[in-house]
Structure formats: structure tokens, C-alpha cells
Amino acid sequence: MKPKVYIETTIFSYLAARPSKQPITAARQQITRQWWETQRHKYTLVVSALVEAECERGDPQVVARRRQLMDDVSLVAVDQRILEIAGLLIVPGAIPAKAGPDAVHIAAASIEECEFLLTWNFKHIANGHIRREVERILAKHGYCKTTICTPEELV
């Protein structure tokens, strides 16, 4: 059985966006495209309904590209259990209240028992301090630990 990867919204955004003129963003777009083309088939890809909703925002052409990218990805509903876990993660030192959707992504990945959560969100998800606290909270409550990483790390 293939390992499961929760694909957070930033991955679809980097894949569908027009090439950036900012060097760091352009490099991340290239890394993401390369991962998508060469690595994604090694995993079972999962998104939550929140990712789907977030991908519906913005330029209609980019939205259409994001929809197409999600065609072969499993969709999970955001249910009460996911929202409860997300609530546990919204505490000082972990996820700030203003970043509630980011807590939902982490909770969904945990409930779905995803081995990895793939993201470029360094502010509230792939942040070393937050990641450590999130892992502590999930373990304390008996939930599955998901390795949070970027496409560059999951090669």
C-alpha cells in the first residue's frame, strides 16, 4: 500500500500559478512541479474539503488549473472530529486563532492517518517551533503524527 500524503493548498497554488519573477517563489514552483511530475505517483494523495474550497478562490483560469490538478486526489469531508482536533491545536505556541484553517489541514492529515502533509506554508504549518508543539499535542491526545514537509524534503 502506498503511503498517504495530504496535499495542502499551497502546493496546488504553486503548481497552477503563472511563473513568478521572485527567485525564491520561482524555485519553489519548479521544485513543486518536479515533485508532482516525478514523485506523486508513489503516494496516495488526499485533500480535505477545505483545500478544495481554498482552491476555488482567485483568478478563474488559475482556479480551473487547480481543479484539474485535483482530479486524481481523494477528497475527505471536514467533519466534527477534524474540527475538534483543530481546536486542540489552536493554543499559544502552536497554531494562532487567526490561522484556524491551517489547524484544520493538520487535523485532517492526522485523522486520515497521512504519513506526510505537503506544504509551502512556513508561517503556521511547516514551522519548526509550531511543528514541535503540534506533534506534542497530537501525541498527548492519541492522534496520528503526520510528518509536515515541503516537496523538496519528500524526494
Image: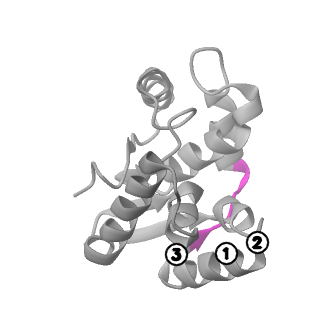
Q: What percent of the width, then of the height, locates residue 34? A: 31, 69
Dot 3: element: strand
Whether label 1 touches label 2, CB < 8 Å: yes
For the magenta stretch, what is the residue range? 75-80
Q: Foreground: 16 or 91?
A: 16
Q: Residues within 10 Å of mark 1 (few under 14, many from 20)?
A: some
Q: What percent of the width, then of the height, locates residue 31? A: 34, 60
What amino acid is found at the position of numbered circle 3 in the picture? Answer: Ser
Asked if the magenta segment contains residue 150, the reply would be no
Q: Residues within 10 Å of mark 3 (few under 14, many from 20)?
A: few
Q: Foreground: 153 or 141?
A: 153
Whether label 3 touches label 2, CB < 8 Å: no
Asked if the magenta segment contains residue 78, the reply would be yes
State the residue position of label 2. Answer: 59
**Mark with earlier residue (3, 1):** 1
Dot 1: element: helix
> Is residue 70 shown above or below 45?
below
Tag shown at residue 74:
3
As drawn, which residue projects farthest toward the front? 21
The structure residue drawn at horizontal position 42% and vertical position 42%, both measured from the top left corner, is: 144
Dot 2: element: loop
The N terminus - image quarter: bottom left
In the shown orientation, is residue 92 left or right of residue 129? right
Picture quarter containing residue 12?
bottom right
